């Protein structure tokens, strides 16, 4: 009996002890003396952007401030960073603020509104407004953080009063990428003699067409100018050069849908695309009333005002129609244009990256790929594996594909080059806990300002592989540390001819329905049967006969509108009304 | 007699390590200082024992109260809430909107009905195909027929290996291996798991392969508890293996079997049929179960937007309303047909 008691107690102790396994995160070993050094504690959500960008900037700051006295009896600063994935995002991290000793948080899914209404987050108004003229901010630059923030991000993150509770870290986007090396070796550039009915491939730079922007001498020279040219280009490269045009993840085929949003953005332009998230517009034109089965526009609605109440009318935007047509055409020609693994559940996102990167060494060379902007960092292990054959990250020449325009009318000219519009999300944000120790406040302010200097933002871009939504330039020295892809992404999102649109807004309708307005659901989710919906546009068309549907472009496009107007029971609130009712008192 | 001695002599690996471990703890207990035997009354001893049991049970009960009672109560309350975003602040208010929405979707829509039908198909498959097959293999292993140890290991392997690894291997074999094999025979097919017209069948096959482990272990363990003397008496009376299975083994392991059936009923609405392991959140519509649908909905609700939670909670309440009486009913039926055989 006693033996059983001892055994039972021992097992109970082991069970109890195991509950402590999950405590804490990964900490850098303490190498400071808190009695003599001011310590700033940072919580970092350890995700795909890595941690090097924070660590390097923190080291630089510690060096820069090593002689600074922030607290009486202490000199210098130590940045103590805890990297973790537990309770470090969204509402979970806000819930921990009362009981944590961390002061600065690098996190995700914490909107400015959430941070403000929690009452536990510091207003960064003073910090983001500081300039070098303010002696109390030794690391501030001539232009304040606020002034250097991209305007669209500023509209979201900074209130009219100048208050800001979170600051954006990176810009997230889904794009089409291409292998420039393959373009060169197989001479896949589009000749200037090409038309929308015939594409001629060339490798001679002097023969390149002007590209979608219509201006020669720019980065997009030699690329298809229109969707029609793009389709012909795909056929030519496959039939003449045995190059498969495109691959993407079969398991996460929603990446293709997210990338199609970039086509919508580019068609609509900055103001009209932004409307999809502000749900506000006066005399809005170009809303499609009728289309034929192939997606040709038959008529438009009269100009109308858009508000939150009738925001569903934005699903009639022509850019959405064009994206659906593009997907349908790609799906109809999938056997020629798309690698079969893009339709297989066995190809995960990392599998697709591997397929694409390693295609160089196979007979099935693939030119284009679709994924999030972080894909190069995510594929690190594949690049490392190719280092020995000069196929590492720094050796390869991946770049962002210059998107073709939907119609010839949208292509620019030499005098008026067409602009590119890119929709991005805010990936990761930082905030500071309220009520930090008064003695440390200046140190924290200095760190935030230091983190946002031009030089350090360039460093963060280089280390994370993703650009920040601020105006900054990257020095030649730092460019040398960037891969071709990394620089291409920076160049695109910081380009002079590029309008970056933040896919979000401070409008109550958006804030109350962020799930419904995320890129799964908006604006490409369609109702294709009574109450069946789908958002995987291209794969949906590919699986048509298997899904026993016969939905054409018109059906899919109208279904996007129908989804917003759907209600299970006649007379009950539609999907859109349910969303709208959330902001009604 | 020979067989009986064989059963008694055969020590398993577990028996071999159990003895030294048991001896170690016994030695440890003898070395602990012994309290002088107090002249305690029966009541005093009983109190001491109760204190010990309460201390031991405290943590599990607390865990139960927090992670079961409180969580589920919170879910029920959440089902009667509606998210409002007023003056820049989101909050929940009391409302029956989500319950009505679920009801309308169920009665007037098709989606929930399809999800339920898929869930029921998977359950019926589990009951009518997996359970009998598991019983067959368990009996085979219990009788120690040829290659029984091999089957015991191979059927249990998918349970030991990470479910994601098994799913990964299966996906690769089906979506690439089978496609290549067909290509060798000159036939081009769409990857089966990605083909909505075939995926359901392949999902059922996958469930069959991975479900054996737990079932076989439980049933064969139950069978080994059958007294050898009972089996020998039957053999002496000339009972063959088939008759022994249906007349003796099944009735004697009935409590285990009925427990599995009842637990299966409770899992109808939560069973994901391994769809998330195979497809992440893009499983084909024609295979989605109710449990999978709820999980994916929950996953897609961003952590910065809690407005989607009440609907999911309402779905959960609906599932509870259906499954609770169903479980009691099935238990009543199983109790009615219980042969009530004792060793």
Image: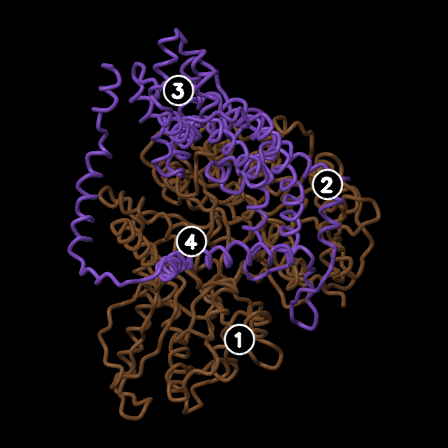
Horizontally, residue A321 falls left or right of residue B17, namely right
Labels 3, 1: one chain: no
Name the front one of labels 3 and 1: 3
Q: Chain of mark 4?
A: A
Disc 3 versus disc 4: distance between alpha carbons? 53 Å
The reply to whether the C-beta atoms of the residues labelled 3 and 1 are less than 8 Å apart is: no
**Residue B115 visible in the current orientation:** no
The part of the image, by quadrant, that contains residue A164 is bottom right
Residue highlighted by disc 1: A165
Residue B88 spot, x, y in % from top left: 66, 71
Name the front one of labels 4 and 1: 1
Above or below: residue A14 compared with residue A102: above
Horizontally, residue B23 falls left or right of residue A275, namely left
Disc 2 versus disc 1: distance between alpha carbons? 42 Å
- Which colour denotes chain A? brown
Chain identifier, purple in the render: B
Residue highlighted by disc 2: B106
Of helix, strand and loop, which one carries label 1? loop
């Amino acid at each position: 009996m006693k033996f059983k008691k001892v055994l039972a107690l021992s097992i109970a102790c082991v069970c109890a002890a195991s509950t402590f396994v999950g405590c804490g995160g990964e900490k850098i070993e303490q190498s400071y003396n808190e009695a003599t050094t001011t310590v700033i504690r940072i919580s970092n959500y350890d995700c795909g952007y890595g941690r090097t960008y924070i660590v390097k900037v923190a080291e630089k700051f510690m060096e820069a401030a090593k002689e600074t006295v922030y607290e009486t009896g202490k000199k210098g600063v130590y940045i103590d960073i805890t990297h973790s994935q537990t309770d470090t995002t969204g509402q979970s991290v806000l819930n921990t603020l009362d009981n944590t000793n961390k002061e600065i948080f690098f996190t995700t899914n914490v909107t400015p509104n959430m941070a403000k209404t929690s009452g536990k987050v510091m207003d960064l108004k003073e910090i983001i407004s500081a300039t070098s003229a303010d002696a109390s901010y030794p690391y501030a630059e001539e232009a304040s953080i606020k002034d250097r923030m991209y305007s669209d991000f500023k509209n979201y993150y900074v209130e009219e009063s100048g208050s800001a509770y979170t600051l954006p870290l990176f810009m997230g986007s889904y794009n089409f990428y291409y292998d420039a090396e393959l373009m060169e070796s197989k001479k896949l550039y589009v000749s200037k003699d090409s038309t929308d009915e015939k594409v001629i491939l060339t490798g001679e730079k002097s023969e390149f067409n002007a590209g979608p922007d219509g201006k020669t001498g720019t980065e997009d020279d030699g690329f298809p100018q229109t969707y029609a040219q793009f389709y012909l280009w795909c056929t030519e490269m496959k039939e003449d050069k045995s190059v498969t045009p495109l691959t993407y993840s079969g398991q996460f085929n929603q990446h293709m849908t997210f990338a199609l949003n970039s086509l919508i953005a580019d068609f609509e332009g900055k103001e009209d695309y932004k409307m999809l998230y502000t749900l506000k517009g006066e005399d809005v034109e170009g809303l499609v009333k009728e289309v034929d089965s192939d997606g040709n526009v038959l008529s438009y609605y009269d100009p109308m005002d858009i508000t939150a109440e009738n925001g569903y009318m934005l699903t009639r935007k022509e850019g959405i129609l064009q994206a659906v047509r593009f997907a349908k055409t790609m799906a109809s020609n999938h056997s020629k244009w798309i690698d079969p693994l893009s339709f297989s559940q066995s190809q995960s996102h990392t599998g697709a990256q591997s397929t694409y990167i390693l295609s160089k060494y196979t007979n099935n060379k693939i030119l284009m790929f679709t994924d999030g902007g972080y894909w190069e960092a995510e594929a690190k292990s594949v690049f490392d594996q190719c280092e020995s054959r000069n196929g590492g990250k720094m050796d390869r020449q991946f770049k962002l594909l210059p998107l073709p325009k939907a119609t010839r009318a949208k292509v620019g000219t030499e005098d008026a080059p067409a602009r590119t519009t890119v929709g991005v999300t805010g990936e990761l944000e930082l905030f500071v806990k309220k009520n930090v120790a008064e003695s440390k406040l200046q140190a924290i302010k200095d760190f935030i300002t230091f983190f946002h200097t031009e030089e350090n933002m360039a460093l963060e871009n280089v280390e994370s592989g993703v650009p920040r939504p601020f105006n900054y330039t990257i020095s030649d020295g730092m460019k040398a540390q960037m891969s071709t892809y990394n620089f291409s992404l920076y160049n695109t999102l910081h380009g002079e001819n590029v309008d970056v649109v933040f896919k979000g807004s401070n409008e109550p309708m958006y804030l109350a329905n962020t799930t419904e307005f995320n890129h799964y659901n908006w604006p490409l989710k369609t109702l294709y049967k009574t109450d069946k919906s789908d958002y995987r546009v291209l794969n949906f068309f590919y699986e048509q006969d298997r899904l026993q549907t016969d939905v054409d472009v018109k059906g899919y496009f109208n279904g996007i509108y129908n989804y917003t107007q759907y209600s299970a029971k006649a007379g009950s609130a539609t999907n859109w009304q349910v969303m709208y009712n959330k902001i009604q008192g | 007699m020979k067989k009986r001695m064989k059963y008694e002599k055969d020590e398993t690996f577990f028996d071999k390590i159990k003895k030294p471990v048991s001896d170690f703890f016994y030695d440890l207990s003898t070395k602990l200082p012994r309290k002088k035997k107090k002249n305690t009354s029966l009541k005093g001893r009983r109190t001491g024992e109760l204190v010990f049991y309460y201390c031991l049970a405290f943590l599990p009960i607390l865990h139960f109260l927090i992670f079961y009672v409180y969580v589920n109560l919170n879910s029920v309350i959440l089902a009667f809430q509606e998210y409002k975003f007023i003056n820049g602040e989101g909050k929940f208010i009391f409302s029956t909107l989500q319950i009505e929405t679920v009801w309308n979707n169920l009665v007037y829509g098709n989606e929930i009905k399809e999800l339920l039908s898929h869930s029921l198909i998977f359950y019926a498959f589990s009951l009518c195909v997996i359970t009998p097959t598991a019983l067959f293999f368990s009996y085979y292993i219990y009788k120690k027929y040829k290659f029984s140890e091999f089957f015991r290991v191979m059927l249990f392997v998918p349970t030991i290996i990470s479910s994601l690894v098994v799913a990964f291997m299966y996906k690769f074999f089906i979506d690439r291996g089978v496609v290549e094999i067909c290509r060798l025979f000159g036939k081009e097919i769409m990857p089966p798991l990605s083909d909505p017209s075939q995926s359901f069948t392949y999902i059922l096959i996958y469930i069959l392969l991975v479900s054996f482990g737990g079932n076989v272990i439980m049933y064969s363990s139950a069978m080994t508890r059958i007294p050898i003397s009972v089996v020998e008496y039957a053999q002496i009376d000339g009972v063959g293996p088939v008759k022994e299975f249906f007349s003796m083994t099944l009735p004697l392991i009935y409590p285990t079997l009925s427990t599995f059936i009842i637990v299966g009923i409770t899992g109808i609405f939560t069973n994901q049929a391994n769809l998330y392991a195979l497809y992440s959140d893009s499983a084909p519509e024609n295979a989605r179960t109710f449990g999978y649908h709820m999980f994916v909905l929950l996953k897609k609700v961003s952590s910065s937007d809690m407005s989607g939670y009440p609907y999911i909670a309402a779905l959960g309440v609906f599932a509870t309303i259906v499954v609770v009486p169903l479980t009691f009913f099935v238990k009543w039926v199983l109790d009615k047909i219980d042969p009530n055989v004792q060793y």
